[in-house]
Image (cartoon, helix red, strand yellow):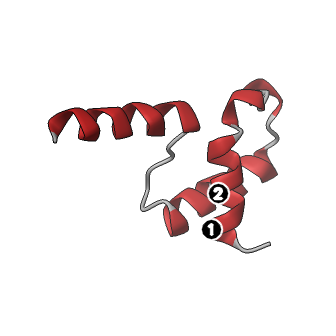
Amino acid sequence: MDGETALALYERNWRFVDQDAIIPREQKLLDRLVAEYGNGHFLTALRASVVQEKFAAAD
């Protein structure tokens, strides 16, 4: 799978990730995905929905 898809899966399913169990290799991968495909920002599904609501309210 490509990096953009991998980051999207992490963001969409972040609530299921045991953050205390992430090993350094996986964290390094996630950091790289965020830097390359997320423009330095990691948006979880919950946070993305809040952002969408703010933009909808501003219209």
Identify which residue is drawn at 53% across, 67% down.
Answer: 37
Identify which residue is drawn at 78% across, 50% down.
Answer: 26
Identify which residue is drawn at 40% across, 30% down.
Answer: 50
Q: Residues within 10 Å of mark 2 (few under 14, many from 20)?
A: many
In the drawing, does residue 46 fall left or right of residue 39?
Answer: right
Q: Position of residue 7 (x, y in %)?
A: 64, 57
Disc 2 + disc 1, Cβ < 8 Å:
yes
- Looking at the image, residue 33 lies above or below residue 22: below
Question: Quadrant location of residue 21?
Answer: top right
Q: Position of residue 24 (x, y in %)?
A: 77, 45
As helix, strand or loop, the secondary structure at mark 2 comes to helix
In the drawing, does residue 30 fall left or right of residue 36?
Answer: right
- Looking at the image, residue 29 lies above or below residue 24: below
As helix, strand or loop, the secondary structure at mark 1 comes to helix
Q: Position of residue 57 (x, y in %)?
A: 22, 32
Q: Amino acid under label 2?
A: Leu
Q: Quadrant of the N terminus?
A: bottom right
Question: Quadrant location of residue 18?
Answer: top right
In the drawing, does residue 21 fall left or right of residue 30?
Answer: right
Q: Which residue is mark 2?
A: 7
Marking on residue 34: none
Q: Position of residue 44 (x, y in %)?
A: 55, 38
Q: Quadrant of the C terminus?
A: top left
Between residues 36 and 2, which one lies in front from this camera angle?
Answer: 2
Q: Which residue is mark 1?
A: 4
Identify which residue is drawn at 46% across, 35% down.
Answer: 49
Q: Amino acid under label 1?
A: Glu
Question: Quadrant location of residue 11?
Answer: top right
The residues tagged by marks 2 and 1 sit, at their Cα atoms, a distance apart of 5 Å
